[in-house]
Amino acid sequence: MTALHADPACRVPASGGQLISDSMHLCDRANDHTVTIMIDPFRALPPRSEAVVFHTRLGLCTAELAEATHPLASEEITTNLIRLAVQAGDAHAAADLLAHRARRPHPLADEQALTSVIETSGLRQRVMPPDLLNSLTSAAEHALAALADLLTCSRT
């Protein structure tokens, strides 16, 4: 974001509609320098397990802008995002990456890995897979036991 504000023509829009309009205008006039100053900070941004979706969405925006002037960087960013989503097992990030494929297809192995993450998570299935349900139930039982111990200790 800092890179975008470095351009004096960029301003904070007053409304959501203006934000979309300004963003489209920015994409139309993104030049090599603007894109370069976005790529390097993104590459330096360490992905955090609690922010995989944010990192993925920011990375996809960066990759989209970089595609015309820095196609290798765009491909590298997308490939790293796929690895991150699969490694983290984040179904929302995986879904974002699969939605992005409509614009730029991913290799079949990557699509299969992303699809597997989504299926394993139960996302969009309306029913929690048995393994996840058992894990959640077990965690809740452990939490309940720990709370009971704390309450017992605080009464004595």
Image: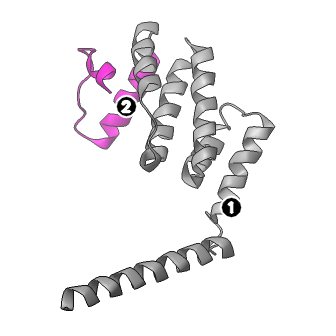
Mark 1 belongs to which amino acid? Thr
Q: Nearer the viewer, residue 141 or 30?
A: 141
Helix, strand or loop under label 1: helix
Q: Residue 145: x, y in percent?
A: 41, 84
Residue 81 horizontal side relative to residue 40, left or right: right
Crowd tier of the residue under label 1, counting other residues whose Cα lies within 10 Å: few below 14, some 14–19, many 20 or above:
some
Instruction: Let me know if residue 11 is in the magenta part.
Output: yes
Q: Vertically, is 86 above or below 130?
A: above
Q: Nearer the viewer, residue 91 or 100?
A: 91
Location of mark 2 (residue): 21
Which residue is depicted at the point 65% across and 69% down? 125
Residue 86 horizontal side relative to residue 49, left or right: right
- Tell me which secondary structure the magenta stretch mostly adopts: helix
Location of mark 1 (residue): 120
Instruction: Let me know if residue 145 is in the magenta part.
Output: no
Helix, strand or loop under label 2: helix
Q: Residue 136: x, y in percent?
A: 54, 74
Which residue is depicted at the point 72% across and 34% down? 106
Crowd tier of the residue under label 2, counting other residues whose Cα lies within 10 Å: few below 14, some 14–19, many 20 or above:
few
Q: Residue 138: x, y in percent?
A: 54, 78
Which residue is depicted at the point 34% across and 40% down? 17
| Highlighted range, magenta | 1-28
Name which quarter of the figure residue 103 lies in. top right
Position of the N terminus by quadrant: top left
Q: Earlier in the sequence, mark 2 or mark 1?
A: 2
Q: Residue 108: x, y in percent?
A: 80, 38
Tell me if residue 129 can be seen. no
Q: Vertically, is 97 above or below 36?
A: below
Q: Nearer the viewer, residue 152 or 104?
A: 152
Position of the C terminus by quadrant: bottom left
